[in-house]
Amino acid sequence: MTETAKPAVRPARPFFSSGPCAKRPGWTPEALKGALVGRSHRSKPGKAKLKDAIVRTKKLLGIPDDYRVGIVPASDTGAVEMAMWSMLGARPVDLFAWESFSEDWVTDAVKQLKLKDTRTLKAPYGELPDLKQYDPTHDAVFVWNGTTSGVKVPNGDWIPGNREGITICDATSAAFAMDLPWDKLDVVTFSWQKVLGGEAAHGMLVLSPRAVARLESYTPPWPLPKIFRMTKGGKIVEGIFEGETINTPSMVAVEDYLDALTWAENAGGLKALIARADANTKVLADWAAKSGWAGFLAKDASIRSNTSVCINVTDPWFEALGDDAKAEVLKKLCASLDKEGVAYDVAGYRAAPPGLRIWCGATVEKADLEALTPWLDWAWRQVKQPVSA
Ligand SMILES: Cc1ncc(COP(=O)(O)O)c(C=O)c1O
């Protein structure tokens, strides 16, 4: 590698991973000192903490009063799969996929649940399938933000208010960063480790009254493990949505999530979180426009994520390389950023076109992205020079 002058400033917090994401500014393990460790989560104070997490999540996100919010096992994946396993099969299902996680949900529906009546509407990395194809007599499964392609759903206009089907939306990298049209979404899931920078482990499951009606009126033909079961005797188990979790949660993770909620509330609530993510993304957009070598994987600005920002390389020298050589260049670029301690975990997803993925959610500071961009240019010069010279 040829050395060129290094930028003078390093990001104070080089944490740009798309999950687990950066902790909130100022976080130290001290934030966990009030954790109810060594106690039962079913004790009065244990249940109060879990209920607090539910109530404050609802308030912060503006979730309608008649929606239920539960803390469930196995992070976002657990929340999505318990909804799919519990609710699908009652109607035909439209499955929308444009990156790896949305593809995972297609696999679940088609290969695992073996649903017969499905339509898969797919788009390549960087694009969105034609959402208007949604048939409102069908159920729908989709991600709000495709974390591995940096492509988000721009709005809920394609979901009719008077739909007959239910909509299952994996919003794990969208919640707390994007406005979600709750009236169009019957199931919404997310985890603690994404936009608020909490600890992984638990998932949040949000159910509309229509989703609850589905649970109470439909019994799937396949067996449901205990950790997926949300009804008893044909009735929703209300306790799950009051903090009586199905199985044992980590009270350390709960404490950390409560700390993240406190930070988010003090930062100004949802609007402020969205504004932070937007401002962070703008730093990268402004830089990419001037960089001469980088652009957005999502060409259409209206579908670009403000959390998992996916950058592709537009330099003609790079574009002329074969796939393996491209991957090698990106690997070197990320390794030099890592070695300098200026950006961790920014390689694009392995199945995505070679590029970078830089998290811009609210817990990332704008100043750190501003400090990062000269390093991106520096790292690019390191990897390009030896080959092109
Ligand atoms: C869109 C999407 N869905 C699901 C997941 C899986 O989340 P978890 O590991 O929290 O279950 C991720 C993780 O990055 C994601 O981005």
Image (spheres, grey):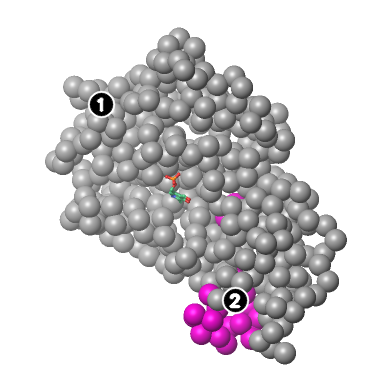
Classify mark 1 as within 8 Å of ligand 1 or not, answering yes or no.
no
Sequence-wise first label, 1 or 2: 1
Of labels 1 and 2, the one closer to you: 2
| Residue drawn where x is 29% and y is 32% of the image | 227
Closest to the observer, 246 or 220: 246
Instruction: Say which element carries label 2.
Output: helix
Closest to the observer, 230 or 245: 245
| Residue drawn where x is 67% and y is 77% of the image | 383
| Residue drawn where x is 39% and y is 56% of the image | 102
Which quadrant does the N terminus fall into?
Answer: bottom right
Residue type at the position of mark 2? Val
Instruction: Say which element carries label 1.
Output: strand
The magenta stretch spans which residues? Answer: 305-327
- Report if residue 90 is visible in the image: yes
Query: In x, y percent, where is residue 336?
Result: 67, 67
Mark 1 Cα shell of 10 Å, populated few (<14), some (14-19), many (≥20): some
Q: Is residue 28 left or right of residue 40?
A: right
Query: In x, y percent, where is residue 64?
Result: 49, 29
Q: Which picture quadrant has residue 71?
A: top left
Q: Is residue 86 left or right of residue 362?
A: left
Q: Is residue 276 left or right of residue 43?
A: right
Q: CA distance from mark 1 to mark 2?
A: 52 Å
User: Which residue, as the protein is rendered here, is positioned at the far top?
Assistant: 44
- Report if residue 292 is visible in the image: no
Q: Which residue is mark 1?
A: 231
Residue 265 inside the magenta-drawn segment: no
On screen, residue 363 above or below 278: above
Residue type at the position of mark 1? Thr
Residue 329: assigned label? 2
| Residue drawn where x is 60% and y is 60% of the image | 346
